[in-house]
Image: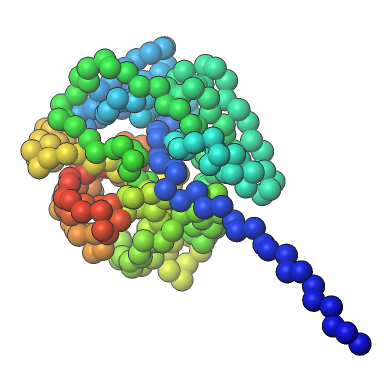
Amino acid sequence: MTAVARPVTAVAARPDVFGGVHLGYVVIGTQRFVDWRRFGADASGLHVDEPARDVLRFRLDEHECRFLLQRSPAEDVTALGWLVDDHETFEIILARVADAGLPVVEGTAHECALRGVERVWRFPGPKGMATEIFTSARTTTTPLRMLQTGFVTGASGLGHVAITAKEPEGIRGNYGQVFDARLSDWITENIAGASLCIRFLRVNERHHSVAVAGVRGLHIDPVRTAIQHLNTQVETLDDLLAAYERVNAHGFRMQWSVGQHTNDRELFLLLRHALGLRVGTRLGPDHRHPGTGGAVGAAHV
């Protein structure tokens, strides 16, 4: 009997979207507009717009919107918006979401206008937040009216979010499956008597765009809000010191006065907003992934 060689069928490689996704904006539902305006403009030094009744927007660069606050009883972050580099990457992400059986909804023209984007699509994300993706952000040449001299955004995106969860592996898997997030590193941190394992995930050059934490040995979520904190980078040491002075002058509660990350060695000040979100200011070695060089500061919002 003569053996017949069978052709080998090549398995198509899974396309990798790493590097093509950037944190673009944050949506917050709140009734406390006075508190947020005071925090955003007076303490954090951001540019504040009021494009419609019951709507506030914070700017920190040329994007029309980086923080969207809408009147709502949620008192929490309700969505994270992610800028996708091109339509090919966009279609890959949408196909993955559809394959996972998640519903995808296109945003209305009004929702796009509020977010400062051309078009947006939404699907369920971690901890009740919506994940929103878009390919084109609207920019403006209107001068910024803010107390900071500038923020570091660009290819690194807006900054990073930290999320706690009962099942952190599910959130890590979500960002790995949808955005091809990679593990930069991880640390164990003792906070208020609890031992947290924190994993830092990157989706572009920034050291991490998402940090995911879980309490070791306990199936609990120690944080009420959808995210534990959001971080943005300031450009200079003067910005860092000025933010510290403003925050103290306006009476915001200090969660931690000065600390240092054990992995990226950034110094930070951590404050607590009335919603329970941790906010603060950071300075240290470049918090992008090792190898990108430089040294910058950062501010938690």
For residue 45, side relative to residue 170 (left or right) = left
Q: Which of 154 and 222 is in front in this view?
A: 154
Name the image quarter holding residue 150: top left
Residue 152: percent from the left, percent from the top? 24, 38
Is residue 130 visible from the viewing direction of this image? no
Image colouring: rainbow
Q: Nearer the viewer, residue 166 or 287?
A: 287
For residue 4, side relative to residue 186 (left or right) = right
Residue 213: percent from the left, percent from the top? 41, 59
Please report the residue visible at 88 percent of the width from the left and 84 percent of the height from the top.
Answer: 2
For residue 71, side relative to residue 41 (left or right) = right
Residue 63: percent from the left, percent from the top? 34, 25
Q: In the orientation shown, which residue stands out farthest toward the bottom? A: 1
Please report the residue visible at 37 percent of the width from the left and 58 percent of the height from the top.
Answer: 200
Quarter occupied by the N terminus: bottom right
Against 47, residue 297 (above or below) is below
Please report the residue visible at 68 percent of the width from the left and 63 percent of the height from the top.
Answer: 10
Against 2, residue 147 (above or below) is above
Is residue 44 visible from the viewing direction of this image? yes
Q: Which of 178 and 4 is in front in this view?
A: 4
Tell me how many marks there are: 0
For residue 269, side relative to residue 63 (left or right) = left
Residue 211: percent from the left, percent from the top? 38, 54
Name the image quarter holding residue 45: top left
Please report the residue visible at 45 percent of the width from the left and 37 percent of the height from the top.
Answer: 85
Name the image quarter holding residue 121: top right
Q: In the orientation shown, which residue stands out farthest toward the right? A: 1
Quarter occupied by the C terminus: top left
